[in-house]
Structure formats: C-alpha cells, structure tokens
Image (spheres, grey):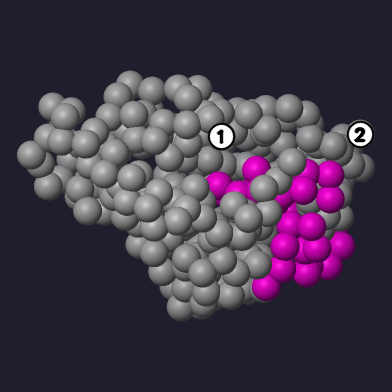
C-alpha cells in the first residue's frame, strides 16, 4: 500500500531534486524506444530527469507531474515539452493518444490498479510502458551502507526498490528487463545533498535528519574509497522494465513511428 506521507514528500523539492538526483543513461531510453514514435508520455516526470531523454525520440513529448515546483523546473529546462499537472491515477491526456508511457523512479508511489488502467487508456493498442529505477551497485560497499541508513527496511536487497515492477501488471505483459551500469563523479557535498532529497529524510524531524546525516558522514570517513576525499566515483545500476499493453496482442494495433516529412502514414512497433 502506498504511504501517502512519503509519496507527497517530494512536492516542494523541485530544484534540489533536479540538482542532486542522478539522471538516466541514454541506453535506458533506447531500451524502451528503439525507434522514434509519434507521442511519448513521461508520467510522474518530476523535474524532467528522464523526460529529457525522450526529446528526439518522439515528435510529441508530454510530461505529467502532480508537483507544481517540479513542473516549473521541467518547463524552464524543456520548453518544447507539453507539461501538465496531473497524477497517474487521473492522467490529463486523451484516450489512445500516446505510443509510449514512461515512469522513472515513481511507479512504486502509484495506486497500481488505477494507474495501470489510466496508462492503458492513454496508450494506443499494443502500446509500450517503460518503468525505470536508479539503484545502488551491490559492489559499492559504502553506497550500500548509506542505503541501509536511509532505507533500513530494504537491507542489502539490490532490487528491493523495484520488486513491484517484476510482477505482472494488470493489462500488461512484461517483454524485457535490462540492467544498465552507470558511473558518475560526485562531490562529498553533492552526495550528502542527494540523500537529503529522499522521502525518508524529507519526512523526518530535525533530530532524525541530523542523525542520518552524521551516519552517512561516518561511512564516508571510514571507507578507503571515500575517506579524506572531496570527490569520488559512484557506480550504480539503472533497471529498466519494458511492458506491452495487452490490447493489440493479436496484431490489431501497435505503436506508431514518427513520420518523416512528406511520407505517408506508417505504423510499426516501438520495441
């Protein structure tokens, strides 16, 4: 069941979320949209961390997000995107109007049944749903230790944050799952500020926030890969799940490719 307090903790975190959260690799977008499509919708788009990867992959890009501060950041960064206030449970987009729906780092906050019904409604028959999460690299011991501080219930389970996506979704069939390795150079301050944008930190009181921050700093001071350093390399994994809407599985419909200028109608699968 979705924790509404945690889910709403991001509503005012637009600029910090954009600045400190990691982006998504181009290969993640390629896994979901290997050929250009006419329309793609990024649902729960936040400040556009993944929306920007849809530019050039769809003739029409739509972003739907419930937080106005998040959407303000997205609009300033991606002026060509149609940015709409809305939720996954009530998507403000017309029926059968998009070829692909993507959800990056947000699906676990949705009401699954209602969101899947809405996603199927806005997708063309046989359309694609792509779910993505950035998670820690099990080989990175210090990042894993910090994960336990902010998310003790998850322990060391690498896929714990994405477990909900591995199950069959109502009205969808899982077609592909991919893990993409990523690496970034991050400052100690940036790493601390990143953890300060997660839901468990945002809803904590000042005392608990100080405890969490001190515990993360203790990990960084103790690990040989981070001790005494102002910058360090952080490895991670982007996990991608690609689903196909059950509608059109008999060949009656498929996602549409973008049409080159002067060409006639053409339809093809987006995956």
Q: Which residues are magenta?
A: 85-114
Q: Which of the labelled discs sits on residue 161, or is there none?
A: 1
Secondary structure at numbered mark 2: loop
Which residue is located at x 35 percent, y 44 percent? 212
- Quadrant of the snapshot with the C terminus: top right
Counting labels gives 2
Q: Position of residue 93 (x, y in %)?
A: 78, 67
Q: Give the answer, above or below, for where 64 lies relative to 267.
A: below
Residue at image x 16%, y 29%?
222
Q: Residue at x 67, y 48 (%)?
A: 3
In which quadrant of the rendered image does the N terminus lie? top right
Disc sitting over residue 250 in the figure:
2
Left or right of residue 264, residue 222 in this image = left
Residue drawn at x 59%, y 33% as measured from the top left? 162
Using the image, tell me which numbered label, if any, was put on residue 238. Answer: none
Displayed quadrant of residue 7? bottom right
Residue 221 lies, with reference to residue 110, above or below; the image says above
Residue 229 visible, this angle: yes
Which corner quadrant of the image does residue 243 belong to? top right
- Helix, strand or loop status at disc 1: helix
């Amino acid at each position: 069941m979705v924790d509404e307090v945690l889910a709403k903790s991001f509503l005012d975190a637009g600029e910090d979320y954009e600045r400190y959260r990691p982006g998504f690799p181009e290969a993640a977008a390629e896994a979901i949209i290997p050929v250009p499509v006419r329309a793609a919708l990024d649902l729960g788009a936040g400040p556009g961390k993944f929306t920007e990867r849809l530019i050039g992959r769809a003739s029409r890009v739509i972003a739907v997000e419930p937080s106005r501060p998040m959407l303000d950041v997205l609009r300033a960064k991606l002026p060509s995107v149609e940015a709409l206030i809305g939720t996954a449970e009530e998507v403000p987009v017309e029926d059968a109007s998009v070829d692909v729906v993507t959800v990056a780092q947000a699906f676990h906050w949705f009401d699954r049944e209602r969101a899947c019904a809405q996603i199927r409604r806005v997708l063309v028959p046989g359309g694609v749903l792509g779910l993505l999460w950035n998670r820690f690299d099990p080989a990175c011991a210090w990042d894993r230790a910090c994960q336990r501080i902010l998310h003790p219930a998850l322990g060391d389970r690498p896929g714990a944050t994405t477990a909900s996506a591995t199950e069959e979704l109502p009205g969808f069939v899982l077609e592909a799952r991919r893990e993409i390795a990523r690496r970034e150079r991050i400052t100690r301050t940036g790493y601390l500020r990143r953890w300060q944008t997660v839901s468990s930190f945002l809803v904590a009181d000042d005392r608990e926030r100080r405890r969490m921050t001190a515990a993360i700093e203790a990990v960084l001071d103790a690990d040989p890969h981070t001790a005494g350093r102002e910058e360090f390399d952080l490895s991670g994994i982007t996990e991608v799940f690609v689903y196909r809407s059950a509608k059109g599985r008999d060949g009656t419909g498929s996602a549409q490719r973008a049409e080159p200028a002067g060409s006639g109608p053409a339809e093809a699968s987006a995956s």
